Image (cartoon, rainbow, N blue to C red):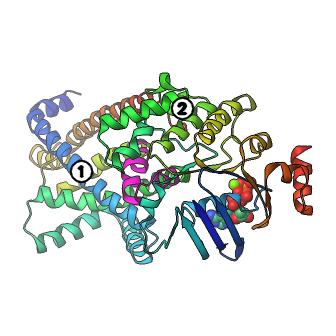
Amino acid sequence: MTAIYEIFMENAAAFMQATTVTLKLTFVSLLLAMLIGLVFAFFKISGNRVLYGIAQLYITVIRGTPLIVQLMFLYFGIIKIVVLPAFWAGSLALAIHAGAYIAEIFRGTIQSIDRGQMEAARSLGMSYPLAMRRIILPQAFKRAIPPLGNQFIIGLKDSSLVAYLGVAEIYGTALYAQAENFQPFETYLVAGFYYLVLVIIFTFLVNKLELKLNVENGGDAK
Amino acid sequence: MIKIKGLNKYFGSLHVLKDVDFAVDKSNVVVLIGASGSGKSTLLRCINFLELNDSGRVEIMGKSVDPKKDDLNKIRQDVGMVFQHFNLFPHKTVLENVIEAPIFVKKMPRQEAVETASYLLEKVGLSDKADVYPCQLSGGQKQRVAIARALAMNPKIMLFDEPTSALDPELVGEVLQVMKELAREGMTMVVVTHEMGFAKEVADAVFFMDEGKIVEEGKPCEIFTNPQHVRTQEFLGQVLA
Ligand SMILES: Nc1ncnc2c1ncn2[C@@H]1O[C@H](COP(=O)(O)OP(=O)(O)OP(=O)(O)O)[C@@H](O)[C@H]1O
Ligand SMILES: [Mg+2]
């Protein structure tokens, strides 16, 4: 016990710093991933075979290969094209990974909106893009919040792999610390603790947000 | 106002509308009746191009419409539609439902849109519900909001697809009341309904559809008391029984 406590105290400053890096990684990559996801969701529902094929290929490859392989592949690919700091290259790689899952989330929730909504909007003279933006997407986003929250938590934990690109986020900090203090068991335990606390906080916030939206809009009824 | 000639519509290999001729004069109310699956909704949806016909001509307000060339969004602004299941926007309040299209389609200043909406909500008897979300309304109230929402675009034609079929019987009257009022004011209306009382009282003409064809049309008194076609007789026998 005391060893764990000592490791915790000794590395508190480094881990706090690392927590901000993890959070930044998560937010930046998830924000990018939502953009990517939205684009590919539209590819899938576009009715255009080529766009659909592109989206399907992307999703299949991402789902069918390990994240660490994708990260390494994308990282070395990205830095061949543009010189990016490891943080940004890592964020981009994480975003490309999560984007595939978020594309499926958005596709699902957009298609779950009753057909009558689009028809009513079009019958009022709205163009397809306007109806999408004003009528369908706000409802689809609301339905996407629970699965997005879940994806966010997965993204938070997945961001640990960016340590291998040399980013000093929580896991990276643990890697470095245990090499110095020769107490890997205690060090990784402390790192795990940080992740756990973050996940618990996010789960709480997502639940709160869901509740709030439900009260505001008076539920999802037609 | 509406003139349809030789219209055909297929869903895949299913021939849903067969050589339909159909016309509605200005300020007239036409009621469309027929068995389930006979193509009433499809015909209605061809009038505002939610479905595109495969052949034939659709003329709206004296203009022949070519869906490939003409701006359908523009045409739809003049053709309001009310649906069986209301299709109100659940994430918007009653008022927001009504001002949405005037603001974002017609680019009407918000102030003006709100004034129009308030007037229309009063007209359908729902002034007190302006800030409520649709899920807090009864079916009859939802449908009246849907009518106000369509009217907010100041359409020249209104289409109703079984506007009272999803309502509890005691709520049907309040919606029909609003529709009668509209008819009295001279709105051109096409109504798919099973409310024969409404048809008798309000319609200038009744069209009976069977298997994608209009098999009989005439004044409501003629159709209801003296139907010529055997299919019309059978259908009315079932509905009026
Ligand atoms: N989008 C569609 N795709 C394929 N078939 C369709 C589609 N819409 C309607 N149909 C078919 O076309 C035929 C006519 O349908 P329509 O909805 O116009 O009938 P209706 O007279 O309005 O019937 P109801 O009284 O049940 O509303 C039916 O056989 C229906 O199954
Ligand atoms: Mg129908």
Q: Residue at x 32, y 46 (%)?
A: A152
Mark 1 neighbour class, 10 Å CA radius: few under 14, some 14 to 19, many 20 or more:
many
When asked about the image quadrant of residue A49, the answer is bottom left
Lateral position of residue A116 relative to residue A216, left or right: right
Mark 1, ligand 1, within 8 Å: the answer is no
Mark 2 neighbour class, 10 Å CA radius: few under 14, some 14 to 19, many 20 or more:
many
Magenta span has A129?
A: yes
Chain under label 1? Answer: A
Q: Secondary structure at mark 1?
A: helix
In this rendering, the label closer to the viewer, 2 or 1? 2
Residue B46 x, y percent position in the rendering: 59, 64
Mark 2, ligand 2, within 8 Å: the answer is no
- The disc label shown at residue A181, or none: none
Q: Secondary structure at mark 2?
A: helix
Amino acid type, label 1: Ser
Lateral position of residue A151 relative to residue B194, left or right: left
Magenta span: predominant SS is helix
Lateral position of residue B24 relative to residue B109, left or right: right
Residue that label 1 marks:
A160
Ligand 2 lies in quarter: bottom right
Residue A22 x, y percent position in the rendering: 19, 45
When asked about the image quadrant of residue A52, the answer is bottom left
Residue A144 x, y percent position in the rendering: 41, 46
Relative to A184, is B118 above or below?
above
Question: Which segment did they paint magenta?
Answer: A119-142
Residue B55 x, y percent position in the rendering: 61, 78
In this view, the residue in front, A34 or B204, is B204
Cα separation, mark 2 vs mark 1, equals: 43 Å
Magenta span has A50?
A: no
Marks 2 & 1 on one chain:
no
Residue that label 2 marks:
B135
Amino acid type, label 2: Cys
